[in-house]
Image (cartoon, helix red, strand yellow):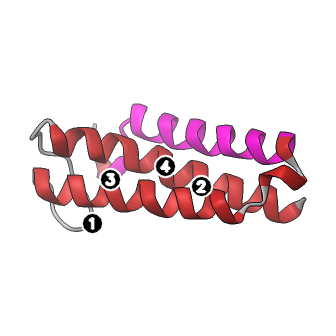
């Protein structure tokens, strides 16, 4: 169960962070990432975050603990959503 919670939380954080970067990349908007703030950098950062999150989710073994794993996934997405909504990513105001 600990594995499902930890990997579910990690998957939520990765996917929650990947989604805004992916959206900014496909809409050709600038948004800061570690690799730059251009659309291509955002697309690649978002895509890789979503893919890594999917891998973490696959490794989480959710059938063994579906409710705790899904709750951890939801909490991870919520935490990163709040992080981006509050403007805390890379010091944005």
The image shows residue 87, relative to residue 41, as above or below, that is above
Tell me if mark 4 has few (under 14), some (14-19) or many (20+) residues whose alpha carbon lies within 10 angstroms of its own: many
Query: Answer yes or no: do the residues labelled 4 and 3 have beta carbons within 8 Å?
Result: no
Q: Residue at x 22, y 53 (%)?
A: 43
Instruction: List the residue tagged with mark 1.
Output: 34
Q: CA distance from mark 4 to mark 1?
A: 16 Å
Rendered image: mark on residue 46: 3
Does 30 sit above or below residue 34? above
Do the CB atoms of the residues marked 1 and 3 lie less than 8 Å apart? Answer: no
Give SS at disc 2: helix
Residue 49 in the image, given as x and y percentages of width and height: 41, 58
Secondary structure under the numbered disc 1 in the rendered image: loop
Please state, as top left, top right, bottom left or bottom right, where the C terminus lies in the image.
top left
Q: In x, y percent, where is residue 72?
A: 74, 46
Of the numbered discs 2 and 1, the one sitting upstream in the chain is 2
Residue furthest out toward the top:
85
Which residue is label 2 attached to?
11
First-in-chain label (4 vs 1): 4
CB contact under 8 Å: marks 3 and 2: no
> Magenta part of the protein: which range?
67-90
Q: Is residue 63 above or below residue 7?
A: above
> Which residue occupies 66% across, 37% down?
74
Q: How many marks?
A: 4
Q: Secondary structure at mark 4?
A: helix
């Amino acid at each position: 169960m600990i594995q499902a919670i930890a990997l579910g939380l990690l998957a939520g954080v990765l996917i929650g962070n990947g989604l805004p970067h992916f959206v900014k990349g496909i809409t050709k908007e600038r948004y800061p990432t570690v690799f730059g703030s251009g659309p291509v950098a955002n697309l690649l950062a978002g895509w890789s975050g979503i893919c890594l999150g999917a891998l973490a989710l696959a490794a989480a073994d959710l059938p063994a603990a579906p409710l705790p794993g899904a709750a951890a996934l939801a909490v991870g997405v919520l935490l990163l959503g709040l992080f981006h909504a509050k403007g805390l990513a890379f010091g944005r105001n």
